[in-house]
Amino acid sequence: MRSASRVEIESFDPLEVLRVLNKHAVEYVVVGGFAVASHGVVHATEDLDVVPARGLDNGARLAAALVQLGAEGSAEGARPTAEALGRRAEFRFDTRFGAVHLVRATAGVPRVEDMEKELVSIGEVQFHRASLKAIKEMKRSAGRARDLVDLAELDELEGDPS
């Protein structure tokens, strides 16, 4: 069970989170519900799932971005630090613009350097999202009920009845 956050969420605004990540030159790829939606299968999502590149330099930039977003970790009020973000596999932070789930070293989720991705724009915000092929591979690997529903809808969107 998640602990209660002390961060007051102004609104769920993943584009604002992406703007701040870009401002700090964080290397990342968007995956999960927001990436699925950007491919055309829209479901309600409560967080922005991001795979950040590993390393202390990127961890430091990510930590600075999260501090600017007012991030507070869901685990015991954890604060973003460069060392932790550069090494640890997974974090979930509440920010003023909604929850951010940092995913790494999870089964089926490739490293940023190895992930098939594409640069997209929504308004003036540019970001890398996982390619449709990569998302489908991650969903298939996870095998959760909601991932299988997304996978079926992504297949249908592509005209693949399998």
Image: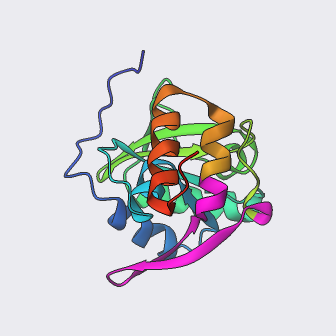
Magenta residues? 113-135
Give the residue furthest to the left.
10
* In magenta stretch: residue 115: yes
Residue at the image point whose x is 60% and y is 68% from the top: 26
Give the residue furthest to the front.
161
Residue at the image point whose x is 38% and y is 62% from the top: 40
* In magenta stretch: residue 85: no
The reply, left or right, for residue 152 in relation to residue 58 is left
The reply, left or right, for residue 10 in relation to residue 138 is left
Q: Is residue 9 above or below residue 18?
A: above
From the top left corner, tell me how far across and down residue 155 is, in percent.
Answer: 52, 52
From the top left corner, tell me how far across and down residue 146 is, in percent.
Answer: 45, 32
Quadrant in which the N terminus appears? top left
Give the residue furthest to the bottom.
124
Quadrant in which the C terminus appears? top right
From the top left corner, tell me how far across and down residue 95 is, in percent.
Answer: 36, 48
- The type of colouring in the image is rainbow
Of residues 144 and 47, the one nearer the viewer is 144
Q: How many labels does the image show?
A: 0
From the top left corner, tell me how far across and down residue 116 is, in percent.
Answer: 71, 66
Of residues 81 and 98, the one nearer the viewer is 98
Residue at the image point whose x is 28% and y is 58% from the top: 13
Residue 25 occupies which quadrant of the picture? bottom right
The reply, left or right, for residue 15 in relation to residue 146 is left
Residue 5 occupies which quadrant of the picture? top left
Of residues 41 and 88, the one nearer the viewer is 41
Q: Is residue 71 above or below residue 63?
A: above
